[in-house]
Amino acid sequence: MPFCGHIKVDPVTENFSKKKTPNIDTAEIAKFEAMASLWWDKKGDFKALHDINVLRLDYIDNQVPLSGMRVLDVGCGGGILSEAMAALGAEVTGIDMGEAPLAVAKLHLAESGLSVDYQHATAEEFSEIHPDGFDVVTCLELLEHVPDPSSVVWACKKLVRPGGHVFFATLNRNPKSFLFAIIAAEYILGLVRKGTHTYGKFIKPSELEQWAATAGLTYLDLTGLHYNPFLRKYSLGGNTHVNYLMHFRKIY
């Protein structure tokens, strides 16, 4: 069932793309620009992304078989997910606002022999040029890094065709997520670099579901993403107290 928590959400309109200020956080972009050369180091600062990529990819592909699909990866970074979806036969476009991560993505693409169209753009800007342009839109681990995540949700709805699918992945906001995603992951276990996340930007599933519903997306599924520090393995399913993925569809 959809999550319908009682929260206050700023109204989102289709005029979002006309905002004079782009929906970007320059500090967040600079943070990932500085780490760009490490995107494809599977034992470095992006090890966690590499470790969960197979799980994320399997989840998406099980919900919507990707082969032959036109897919847009919003916030593609260095292309970890984009390349994986292309390897499954999807026609992939990746967009990001970080110049350095995009350069790394293009360089790695040349080595992999796969085909991905990488472009420098925000979701809002791209939606003005390519409305209803994709069968599937993925937006994973991006919403917690932008000033107005509801605007990105609306843009993703505009980018996907009627009948198409949208996937989001982000972090829940509660005491457990603060303990696990920041204290444990950043300061104790070292799963990600210190300062990667800001707790106040975490998003409850009820908030994301309401933004999506306001934009015109229909909720289909929700699953949690978990890390076992003893086995040092990630898994999907169960509670959504920390990381989670949500699947929506644009009915019309």
Image: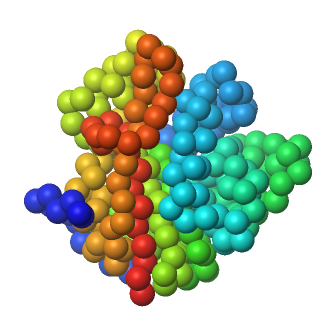
The residue at 17%/62% (across/down) is 4
Any part of residue 116 in sight? yes
The colour scheme applied to this rendered structure is: rainbow
Up the image or down, 231 lies above or below 136; here it is above
Q: Quadrant of the C terminus?
A: bottom left
- The residue closer to the viewer here, 213 or 10, is 213
Whether residue 23 sits left or right of residue 40 in the image: it is left
Any part of residue 144 in sight? no
Up the image or down, 197 lies above or below 218; here it is above
The image position of residue 87, as x and y in percent, is: 76, 54
For this orientation, the residue located farthest to the left is 6
The residue at 54%/57% (across/down) is 62
- The residue closer to the viewer here, 68 or 205, is 68
The image position of residue 251, as x and y in percent, is: 41, 82
Up the image or down, 76 lies above or below 226; here it is below
The image position of residue 174, as x and y in percent, is: 21, 36
Up the image or down, 51 lies above or below 213; here it is above
The residue at 27%/52% (across/down) is 205
Residue 189 found in image quarter: top left
Whether residue 109 sits left or right of residue 31 in the image: it is right
Whether residue 86 sits left or right of residue 252 in the image: it is right
The residue at 37%/48% (across/down) is 223
The image position of residue 71, as x and y in percent, is: 63, 67
